[in-house]
Image: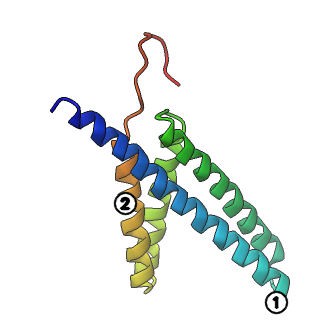
Amino acid sequence: MSSLPGNSRINAHKVAALLVRIEAGFLAALGGYLLLRTATSEVEALDAVIAEIVFLIFGAIGLFFAGRGFLQKRYYGRGSTVMANLIAIGVAYYMIDGGRLAMGLTLGVFALVTLLAAIAAVPHQSNHHGTTS
């Protein structure tokens, strides 16, 4: 039974990677939607929409690589995943407070599950006594 914790860690890495990559896909799709919508309709604050699109695309790229870090059992990706999901939990709170209960609960639950998976995915320890990557 000593292999059970190792297996659960492997599963935590895979689950965290999957959830983070789902988030990355969602951000990329939202950025694409905003880009398409901006190109096909009148926009009052074009500079703000362009900033949102750039933010979403870079966020998607960052989360995609964070998922790669989980698959490689490395430290990189954990911090950005934790921070992104703490922000998402805050956004979910304001969505619920603003009357968008279903969207807020969906985002909040998904962000919480992803946050817990990121915390559970403990990086692989190396045999040397220096800093770990």
* Residue 41 numbered mark, or none: 1
Do callouts 1 and 2 mark residues in contact (Cβ within 8 Å)? no
Residue 80, image x and y in percent?
54, 46
Left or right side of 45 for 25: left
> In terms of image quadrants, where is residue 51?
bottom right
Q: Which residue is drawn at 64% across and 56% down?
A: 59
- Disc 1 marks which amino acid? Ser
Horizontal and vertical percent position of residue 127: 41, 13
Front-most of residues 20 and 94: 20
User: Seen from this angle, which residue lies furthest bottom?
Assistant: 41
Q: Residue at x 37, y 60 (%)?
A: 112
The percent position of residue 17, horizontal first and vertical second, equals 48, 50
Is 14 in front, or is 42? 14
* Point 70% across, 60% down: residue: 57
Amino acid type of the residue that numbered disc 2 sits on in the rendered structure: Leu
Residue 71 as seen in the image, left or right of residue 125: right
Q: Distance between the residues labelled 1 and 2?
A: 35 Å
Residue placed at 54% from the left, 36% from the top?
76
Residue 101, quarter of the rendered image: bottom left
Disc sitting over residue 82 in the figure: none
Image position, residue 113 (x, y; %): 36, 59
The residue labelled by disc 2 is 112
Picture quarter with the N terminus? top left
